[in-house]
Image (cartoon, rainbow, N blue to C red):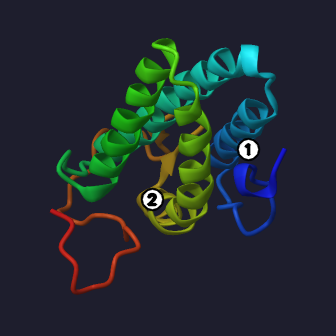
Amino acid sequence: MTVANTLSWDDDLALGDERTDHTHQEFIELLNATTAAAPGNKLAAYQCLLEHTVEHFSQEERWMSACGIAPDFCHFSQHASVLEVMKEVERRAQAGEHAYIGSMIEALVEWFPMHASSMDAGLVSYLQEKGFDTATESFKDGSSVKVDGTAPDCGHETSHSCG
């Protein structure tokens, strides 16, 4: 494995939410497994990473929706953009263009730490503030969706609009 195509789990990536951190560790393991896979197994390994990423993003989006965060919030759109490219890479790899997998892994290695430390960190803080338990996917006080017009910090400059 080359350094450019792997990530290591460390304290800088830990966000203090057990379920989020576990999901992120799994993502890193699958990303690294894709890098390490033999050429004949690379597509299958990538498809496992893609399947995990679909569920990973769906999980976070369920949490955001439960807290009343509008679907036009930038965290949703960033997930959609990443999945769109990942699915196109899968399509191309299925057509024999396997080099795109390596390029996608490089892009994910560059993208993920910043996404985790900005958007996901803001989400975890927001969920904790709202009393949302990611393990049970419910509010600790037993209430349902909480809509109060606020959204988590997405990591953008304050002058940048997310909506």
**123 is higher (above) or lower (below) than 97:** below
Q: Nearer the viewer, residue 137 or 14?
A: 14
Query: Residue placed at 45% from the left, 46% from the top?
Result: 141
Q: Earlier in the sequence, mark 1 or mark 2?
A: 1
> Which type of secondary structure does the marked residue at label 1 adopt?
helix
- Between marks 1 and 2 in the image, the one whose residue lies nearer the viewer: 1
**113 is higher (above) or lower (below) than 17:** below
How crowded is the residue under tag 1: few (<14 C-alpha within 10 Å), some, or many (20+)? some
Q: Nearer the viewer, residue 126 or 35?
A: 35
Q: Residue 131: x, y in percent?
A: 47, 55
How crowded is the residue under tag 2: few (<14 C-alpha within 10 Å), some, or many (20+)? many
Q: Nearer the viewer, residue 146 or 116?
A: 116
Query: Residue placed at 80% from the left, 57% from the top?
Result: 3
**147 is higher (above) or lower (below) than 133:** below
* Amino acid beneath label 2: Leu
Q: Quadrant of residue 27?
A: top right
Placement of the N terminus among the 4 image quadrants: top right
Tell me the tag on residue 25. 1
> Which type of secondary structure does the marked residue at label 2 adopt?
helix
Q: Residue 63: x, y in percent?
A: 40, 42
- Which residue is denoted by mark 2 in the rendering? 123
